[in-house]
Amino acid sequence: MIPARTFFSVLLITSLAAVPSASAQTQVSVDFSKPAYFPLLKGKASLFQEGLAEKPSLEVAMQPLDDLKIRAFRPLVNQGGDKLISYENGELSVTRDRSLTAFISETHKRQIVPILPLYQSPEDLRRADWKTRQEPPRDFNLYGRAMEEFVGLYEGTYPLMWEVWNEPQEKAYLDSDDTSRDYKQIYQNVAPAIRRADPDTLIVGPAVANSERVSGAFIETFVQDVKKDDLPLDYFSIHSYGRHKKALRKRKRGADDRNDFIIEKARMAMGTDFQTVPLVFTEYEYYPAGADVPWHYLRELTVGATKFLTDLEYFIEQTDIPFVTWNRYQHQGPNHRKGGLIDNKLRKRPIFHAFDFYGRMPTERKMLSLGKEGAKGLKGFASADAMGAGVLLWNESEEAASIDLSTTNLPFERGSVSMYRVDSNHGSYLEESSSDESIPVLVEHFQKGTLESQRLQIPGPGIVYFEILPESEPRQGAYLEASYIRSWQWAGRTENGITGDYGDFDWRTWTARVGVKGETGRGVAGVTMDNTPEVVSFVGQTFSMKASSDPNALLGIRVDYLVDRKAIKSVLLHGGTFDPRRSTELPWAREGATADKVIEIPELGGEHLATEFSFDAHAPQAWLRSEQRRTIVSFWMENTGAESQAVFRMLPGGVTASAERLEVGAPRDGNELRNGSVGRELLNEKNRTVLRPFPDVWHKNGG
């Protein structure tokens, strides 16, 4: 048997036989001590499926998700189907959809939020002369009542997002002579109905697509109606098929050049009035819709995986877009368009491995240089935290790229490196590979925090992933006992675009991330939770933060106490970056520029953050008597210098270890998950099903 180290040497020598002279090498370097802006947020790589992934069965088809780190999954199914909603003799009858209920269960087991579109008219609610289920309902008010009862069947199940209709500007999905008029009626009746059915569930719309029938007028009218009628809207959803440089920015349709900049149109329509309403792509594909079969076939090959990563790089910089659900998860057979991360036999395509590698990477991005004259088509990410590090490189061109990779300043002294390849000969069963798996190759064990330089070739197209793990896993601390309800983020839009500031809360790890792109700006993220513990520890770290004399400069944690969903008291914790004269307000909860009570905590004033807060000690009596014990905890960074960032992790009270030990990494052990222990649902004291993350569902790296 060949030792692992020798095996890698043989493989590397074989690769080098085709490597050009040293002068053609691209020098790729990573400094793990230097933070890079725009973290690798995992919601950017979420999933869409036309129908349900149910080959050979829903439960089995969802099993490959155990290896991925997606945050959201949108199936395009008819939740208002004929068998679920009936109307006879003036009485509505609504029943649960068994398949939908199973889908929610399967996603929640994996701590994935379902995005569920409500569209199509049930037969009993259609016009007498109906021809298709895509026609508007005959009675919009009755349709709203039906949706209220249907959503109410899932009341108390969190997190959950309901999307009102699907691509209403398209005749194929809303068969109307005036789609804008009829969608207005649908949204005006359905969105408030969802809020009545469950005030805590999330409402998404208008699911508008970048197509010939879409125009700025449709988006502008929708936004104006939402604002004028004070309609609930938590996420603004859009769809697009085609590479971002064409489909997202400009699409030409023969002589009719509409210049549909769908992201820009949505941003301009919302402007600065909807800063707590993020944009989300609930369908996206890098190849154009309606393309010929060869285009769809390319999605199944290595070239499709590299194009996914290139577009992912673009979306990572779109800070007001927390979710992008990519088309599609499973290719289900000849009656469906080709493509998918897996096929109906659960075999993995190259894009599956690209999703997997990205999900395994720690979220905190580090400085990666591709040299002054990088190889054509060569791109990459690097990231690290206390739990591990990763370098993901891909070559989108058709020419091989020869690289010399050097790394410095790992956050741990000893560990091991594994290399994974995806190209026509590795992990791509539809090309030349004999397996659908990407098999790791042990590179080396290392000491003193530095790896040996690696010289290798990345085929065109091709992907290489280096996973770097410490010899011993750092202490992680216990898990927070609380019930997650929803997240909040500040969109950071201007009249002309976005600031690049970001805020993100990851419910999987109870971790908040905020960043300020320019010298001034603000990143704000928050979480609503029930069953708030008596005491919570906050542990975190700041990056590139600068002292500022600006009165609005702030790094702090704000706690708002809610009774009957209304904030009745606020407390602001800070470490010294605070001025009572500040004027910019928190955009949710009790609002205000500061708080009812302000507490300075020196432990929140350095690079490493670690403190403990007693919620009960500062709570009003009405909150202490409430059943929910609901709070909104917000993480606030403002005017702290260019590309300043902060990470906060919430842990149980009593955690006193230093931030250097706990830092901001997420647990990476996936043995329990792969053995089938994929989480479970809990009932709070009101017997409402509430998703709560558990340590044993964590897999690999990332946060």
Image (cartoon, rainbow, N blue to C red):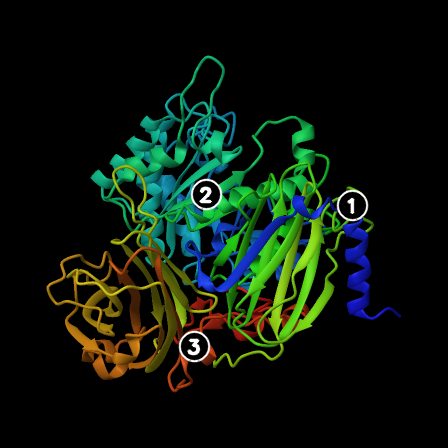
| Residue 401, image x, y percentages | 67, 44
**Which residue is found at the position 63% from the left and 74% from the top?**
415
Seen from the viewer's position, the closer of residues 600 and 693 is: 600
Residue at 26% in and 36% down: 225
* Residue 502 sits in quarter: bottom left
Mark 3 vs mark 1, foreground winner is 1
Task: Kindly give the residue lying farthest to the left in the view shown.
Answer: 581
Q: Is residue 353 visible?
A: no
The residue at the far top in this view is: 255
Packing grade of label 3 (10 A; few <14, some 14-19, many >=20) is many
Query: Of 491 and 480, which appears nearest the observer?
Result: 491
Label pair 3/1, CB-CB below 8 angstroms: no
Where 212 falls versus 567 (above or below)? above
Residue at image mark 1 = 18
Q: Identify the residue at horizontal 43%, vertical 23% (top origin).
A: 213
Q: Does dot 3 land on a helix, a strand or a loop?
A: loop
Asked if disc 3 and disc 2 are in contact, CB closer than 8 Å, the reply is no
The residue at the point 46 percent across, 39 percent down is: 119
Foreground pick, 576 / 213: 576
Q: How many marks?
A: 3
Q: Is residue 521 above or below residue 592?
A: above
